[in-house]
Image: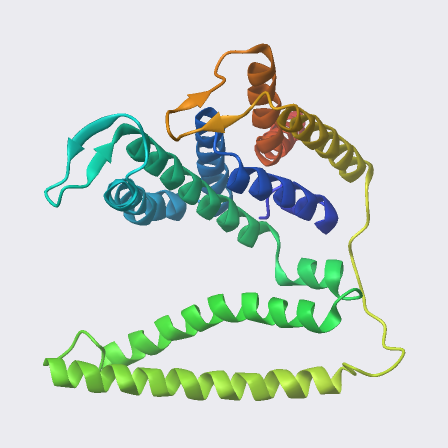
Amino acid sequence: MKDAFSKLHPFTNMLFFVFAIGFCMFLMHPVCLMISFIIGLFTAIYLNGKRTAAFSLKVLLPLLLMTVIINPVFNHSGATIVEYLPWGNPLTLESIIYGLAAAVLLCSAVLWFSCFHNVMTSDKFVYLFGRIIPSLSLLLSMTLRFVPRFRTQLQSVRKAQKAIGKDVSNGSIIKRVRNAVKILSLMISWSLENSIETSDSMKSRGYGLKGRTSFSIYHLTLSDKICIFVNIAEAALLIAILFSGQMHCRYFPTVKFELCSVSAILFYCVYSLFLLTPLVINVKEEIKWKRLLSAI
């Protein structure tokens, strides 16, 4: 069953993710980074389930640690020298803090893009951009749809090959390479066959013909309009505070940023409320659904 936020109009979903990912990628304030990461993690877990938590532990944490370690090795800016590296370059406190901030930003972006991929399906993307950029929207839609299908097909092929002892995990190194080449050949054949079937299907449905119409089940509801208005108002307030210079943050040559000013606290609160939009909508619908069930 799809969550309540995913059931909203595609424009409502797209507007939220444009602002959410935009703020996530351009805000380097430490508090904002933590807000984006924490809420993004909970949102991704809610939308994708437990596999997101496993993905976060297996991929995001090593990625975070690697970024924190690598950045100070190559970035030597900063006024506070902690130690000198064996090859003579200084290790600065500012470069370590900046590396940690960059790592959190990268992990947050990955989490929000995973949420985007879960909510913005290919049909929503085509609905939004099909009339404006039809060729590009169709290409992106097919690409987004192809990746999960390719992964599913690859798993099926590997299971079949493993059942007959011809998987990449069976035999010697040479045999494993041969098995991998065989699987790759099967996947290429499947991809080409699938592209031909897609082309024939599109041609039979009149794609590219003049006067061709399209069917859509999406309609702007009152909930969509309220959500759009609230999101735009919150984003406008956040942008206004940013342009006022109250959330200025720097890491070099020394670390300096506003932490507890009135504008900063207001920004934290509004930013948190904005990013919590999907969770708030879903929790509200769950409470409403449980009340209806208890009334039966």
Q: Is residue 204 above or below residue 148?
A: below
Where residue 168 appears, x then y in whole percent?
21, 77
**Residue at 48% in and 68% down:** 147
Residue 125 position in % (x across, y down): 67, 60
Q: Nearer the viewer, residue 188 or 60?
A: 60
Q: Which coloring applies here?
A: rainbow
Q: Quadrant of residue 98?
A: top left
Q: Residue at x 13, y 85 (%)?
A: 174
Residue 294: image location, x then y, percent: 62, 26
Relative depth, front residue between 194 and 69? 69
Residue 274 higher or lower than 44, as above or below: above
Q: Quadrant of residue 141?
A: bottom right
Relative height, residue 91 to residue 177 (above, below)? above
* Label total for image: 0
Q: Is residue 110 visible?
A: yes
The residue nearer to you, when weighing 269 against 176, is 269
Farthest residue, direction right:
211
Nearest the eye: 10 or 290: 10
Q: Quadrant of residue 68?
A: top left
Q: Does residue 9 show up?
A: no
Q: Residue at x 74, y 87 (%)?
A: 204
Name the residue: 74% across, 62% down: 129
Asked whether, in this view, residue 50 is left or right of residue 72, the answer is: right
* Image side of residue 23 versus residue 207, left or right: left
Question: Residue 135: where, in percent of width, then height?
Answer: 71, 74
Q: Quadrant of the C terminus?
A: top right
